Amino acid sequence: MGCARARQVRIFLSSAAVTPAARLRGLRPDWLSDPKVWRTEVLAGLVVALALIPEAISFSVIAGVDPAIGLFSSFTMAVTLSVVGGRRAMISAATGAVALVIAPVNREHGLGYLVATVILAGVCQVVLGAIGVAGLMRFVPRSVMTGFVNALAILIFMAQVPEMHDVPWPVYPLIIGGLALMVLFPKVTRVIPAPLVSIVILTVITVAAGIAVPTVGDKGELPSSLPVPGLPDVPFTLDTLTTVAPYALAMALVGLMESLMTAKLVDDITDTRSCKTRESIGQGIANIVTGFFGGMGGCAMIGQTMINVKVSGARTRLSTFLAGAFLMVLCIVFGPIVSGIPMAALVAVMVMVAFGTFDRHSIAPKTLRRMPAGEIAVMVITVIVVVATHNLAIGVVAGTLTAMVVFAKRVAHLADVTAVTDPDGSTVVYRITGELFFASSNDLVGRFDYAGDPEKVVIDLSAAHIWDASSVAALDAIEAKYARRGKTVEITGLNDPSADLHGKLTGELAGGH
């Protein structure tokens, strides 16, 4: 919501100096005014649509539903988010992470409950987006983001390994040929995306030569008609709600985490900003729409987004819309042709995406020598957890928690205590420097000489800051120890926030005195 208001303010402030005709041109999307942009967006949408088909079918298998349901979900997610999403050019569709979360619902209760879960998850995402959950993204450190990207690249590659195992030998030269085409063709021209050229050429070769290799059609039957909206076939009772609610909340959190991380990644690649709040709410709306069309839901697809943004160069909502629209056209109108596309062609595309996504600079010896050990540990833990669980959201949470522990440990050591006694021996001044919070204040009590200090003790906090109740409790404990020996303590130098917190809590914490 805040993003929309800021955009309205910018438009309002600039409107006085712009003529109506110019203002109308400014509201026109780039792809309407620039043929090159239009061509790029259309071709990018076509490439993504082709890559979505086997992925959507595979995720349908994971969820235990008919392949058509996964394809319908990809269609409705992409088309809806092209309108309501907050990150232009990002691709959302049926995903493996969401499929893993909702698979038990379908297995134990049936398709009707799965659809109800998707709708409720969408409602949860709208609520979470409205209350500002997207703001939590600023707490994700760069080392976690790097680990997220590298883990993503590994997962994309690992997903292609089954397509290269126990297959006819022509698959391997086809994959190598596809990779070579995608490396060399951009040196000739960038007018047509290299992945599209690779898919077309390899398909023509296999069909013309009659080479027997696995094809898209082997993954599952493509739908022959558009989805029809309707209500989930479940009893609308409290029992149904309690059954689907835990799965819906899990799906909402996983979907938002992956979508917001993907949006942040696209922001970095394109050097543009996106509205994470709008994206969060948009993901919820898209899942609600998908649920009413009987779909399995989804979230941002990082591999297909990389194809769209990084490989094909798309930057507008048109490519997102066309990815979904072309997906249905390819399935319904050109189903027999699409079914003949060799999986080797799509494997080559995804391997190239994995290679381009991996941040090789992050593991270069020069970088590792200069990077703090804690930062490296955070990145490695993120990668390991993501790869082990095949869940990007769990890995990001684990990496962020690790980063918080590393940060707390690092900052805790910055707190120091020095003591200076007056020449007459009547007063001792303890000067505390650094940040006082639960990690640094725990050993603060042991830094004072309660028995040997004179009658008056001054604790100077002018170079410190009190952050939490643990620090106030530690200061109370210090005063209590001196008081039991008949000595007085004076705390000085508190800045305004520290004085306010100390004033509210001192003497009120159990065990302080």
Image: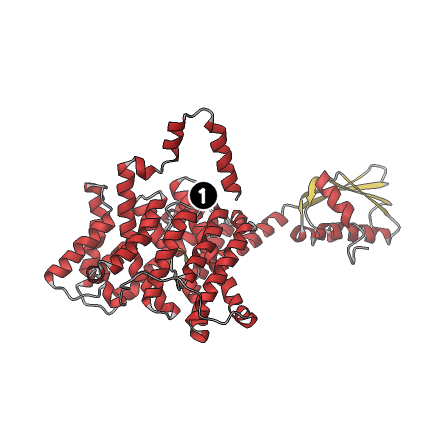
Give the image location of residue 324, x and y in percent. 33, 54
Residue found 27% across the figure and 63% down from its top: 224
Classify residue 93 by image quadrant. bottom left
Farthest-out residue, right = 486
Give the image location of residue 226, x and y in percent. 31, 60
Which residue position is annotated with label 1?
Answer: 274
Seen in the picture, residue 292 relative to 106 is either above or below; the reply is above
Q: Nearer the viewer, residue 122 or 164?
A: 122
* Residues packed near mark 1 inside 10 Å, few (<14), some (14 to 19) or many (20 plus): some
Q: Nearer the viewer, residue 476 or 103?
A: 103
Circle 1 SS class: loop
Residue found 26% across the figure and 38% down from its top: 36
Give the image location of residue 4, x and y in percent. 49, 41
Seen in the picture, residue 389 relative to 305 is either above or below; the reply is below
Residue found 21% across the figure and 52% down from its top: 198
Report the quarter where the C terminus lies: bottom right
**How many numbered tags mark residues here?**
1
Residue found 69% across the figure and 51% down from its top: 441
Give the image location of residue 186, x and y in percent. 22, 43
Residue type at the position of mark 1: Ser
Q: Nearer the viewer, residue 60 or 82?
A: 82
Q: Nearer the viewer, residue 460 or 337?
A: 337
Farthest-out residue, bottom = 108
Q: Is residue 381 visible?
A: no
